[in-house]
Amino acid sequence: MHITILGSGSAGNCTLIETDTTRLLVDAGLSARQIANRLALINRNIEQVNGIILTHEHSDHVRGLGVLCKTRPLPVYANRLTAEAITTDPEWPATVRISWRLFSTGGSFEVGDLLVESFSVPHDAYDPVGYVIRHPGSGVAVGVLTDLGHATKLVTERVRQMDALVVEANHDLKLLQEDAARPWALKQRIMSRHGHLSNDAAATLASDVACDKLRHVFLAHLSRDCNRPELAQQTVADKLRKIGANHTAVTVSSQDKPTATLTL
Ligand SMILES: [Zn+2]
Ligand SMILES: [Zn+2]
């Protein structure tokens, strides 16, 4: 299995998960043009993508969806509330019809040779989910967790025994609290139990689910103003070292360019 975060942050999120025969995007929150450009940077193209799986309806996760699906009838996997929230948004282009593949939160489905498991995460959206994506052929599994206010017991249980984990490290609590540009109500929303994970919370989650096979942790959805890549990296890496998980690499994804492709 290969994992490339094409871009991640509050301005847009999109991750490519691949096997030899199947390619999946998790979210389409960059513009369609940016998604095409970034796929081209790694010698891929949108025609090779078999489907898009959505975590929730916020614009930084679905921004490119309309244009992508206008030009090509890609299957889009989402739960019903997420699909409804997208297509009833006043800004949704009325002419675009999506090939929805609806699933129930908590359920799993197959796309090509990948098995996708969904589970509920606490975030201020209609029915937000996290995913575990498994390649039964090789036994490899990756957990994808962006946009959650806190790691519930369910979340922690679902992402144990992963080979790789994509987890949100949105903000440094101190930088968020000191940010003069952000109104108090917005800070409250970000810090709430239905907001976004801090670096410390991501570190705690990563160390809680660390195991012999966890080789890689990608940090995602970093705030431009209230975080710094080296701070997020250090916070999570330090915590993993502390519990002896020296085999687990930690890399920070970028809003502006794809990560190196991880092959498992
Ligand atoms: Zn969100
Ligand atoms: Zn988001």
Image (cartoon, helix red, strand yellow):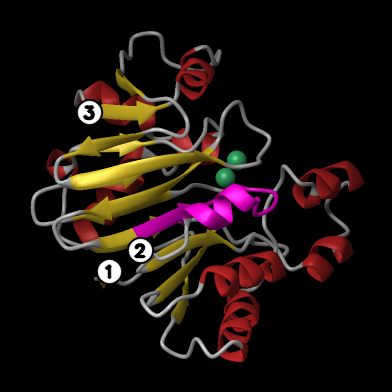
Q: Quadrant of residue 89?
A: top right
Whole-angstrom CA distance, mark 2 to mark 1, is 8 Å
* Residue at 18%, 38% in the rendered image: 50
Q: Are marks 1 and 3 in contact (CB under 8 Å)?
A: no
Badge 1 or badge 3: first in the primary sequence: 3
Q: Are marks 3 and 2 in contact (CB under 8 Å)?
A: no
Q: Is 10 or 53 nearer to us in this picture?
A: 53
Q: Is 36 or 148 nearer to us in this picture?
A: 148
Question: Disc 2 marks which amino acid?
Answer: Pro
Label for residue 258? 2
Q: Position of residue 185 (x, y in %)?
A: 88, 42
154 inside magenta stretch? yes
What range is drawn magenta here? Answer: 142-158
Whole-angstrom CA distance, mark 1 to mark 3, is 23 Å
| Side (left or right) of 177 relative to 71 | right
Check the image and name the residue furthest to the left: 21
- Whether residue 27 is visible: no
* Residue at 53%, 41% in the rendered image: 60
Q: Kindly state the secondary structure of the residue where label 3 is placed.
A: loop
Q: Residues within 10 Å of mark 3 (few under 14, many from 20)?
A: some
Q: Position of residue 62 (x, y in %)?
A: 45, 34
Q: Are marks 2 and 1 in contact (CB under 8 Å)?
A: yes
Q: Kindly state the secondary structure of the residue where label 1 is placed.
A: loop
Question: Disc 3 marks which amino acid?
Answer: Leu
Question: Disc 1 marks which amino acid?
Answer: Thr
Reading the image, the residue beneath label 1 is 261
Q: Kindly state the secondary structure of the residue where label 2 is placed.
A: loop
Reading the image, the residue beneath label 3 is 74
| Side (left or right) of 181 relative to 100 | right
